[in-house]
Image (cartoon, rainbow, N blue to C red):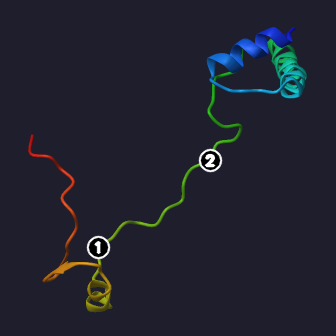
Amino acid sequence: MLDREQVHKVAHLARLELTQEEEERLTTQLGDILGYFEQLNELDVSGVEPTTRAIDVSNVVRKDTLQPYAEREAMLDSAPDRDGDFFKVPKIVNAD
């Protein structure tokens, strides 16, 4: 089981300043969490395939098709900076 000294050590490593009341509360809360993991360790999962989700899901997305934008000029006019038919943006790549 987790004791207050261990919580204090972890808080120190994480650079957290905890009050005595917070240390006591976290000792109880983290102890409960670790106890739950101990319960999970008792389960036999030898025949269970590892998964990232409990149910199988897939993203439903629209097909990405190129099409002209009807309000192109209005969109370009609203840009903070423009160079002809293009948006003008700050350079972010170094030549080094």
Residue at the spot of label 1: 66
86 with respect to 56 (left or right): left
Residue at 33%, 71% in the rendered image: 65
The relative height of residue 92 versus residue 15 in the rendered view (above or below) is: below
Q: Which mark is residue 4?
A: none
Say whether residue 42 is visible. no
Identify the image quadrant of the C terminus: top left
Q: Amino acid at mark 1?
A: Leu
Q: Quadrant of residue 56?
A: top right
At label 1, counting other C-alpha atoms closer than 10 Å, the crowd grade (few under 14, some 14-19, many 20 or more) is few
N-term-proximal mark, 1 vs 2? 2
Q: Amino acid at mark 2?
A: Val
Q: Mark 1 and 2 residues: CB-CB less than 8 Å, in contact? A: no
Say whether residue 25 is visible. yes
Q: Quadrant of residue 91?
A: bottom left
Q: Quadrant of residue 44?
A: top right
Q: Gap in Å between the C-alphas at discs 1 and 2?
A: 27 Å
Secondary element at tag 2 = loop
Q: Position of residue 61 (x, y in %)?
A: 49, 62
Which of the two residues, 26 or 45, is positioned nearer the viewer here? 26
Residue at 86%, 23% in the rendered image: 20
Secondary element at tag 1 = loop
Residue at 57%, 50% in the rendered image: 58
67 with respect to 37 (left or right): left
Q: Position of residue 15 (x, y in %)?
A: 63, 24
Residue at 46%, 67% in the rendered image: 62
Residue at the spot of label 2: 57
5 with respect to 82 (left or right): right
The relative height of residue 71 versus residue 31 in the rendered view (above or below) is: below
Which of the two residues, 87 or 50, is positioned nearer the viewer here? 87
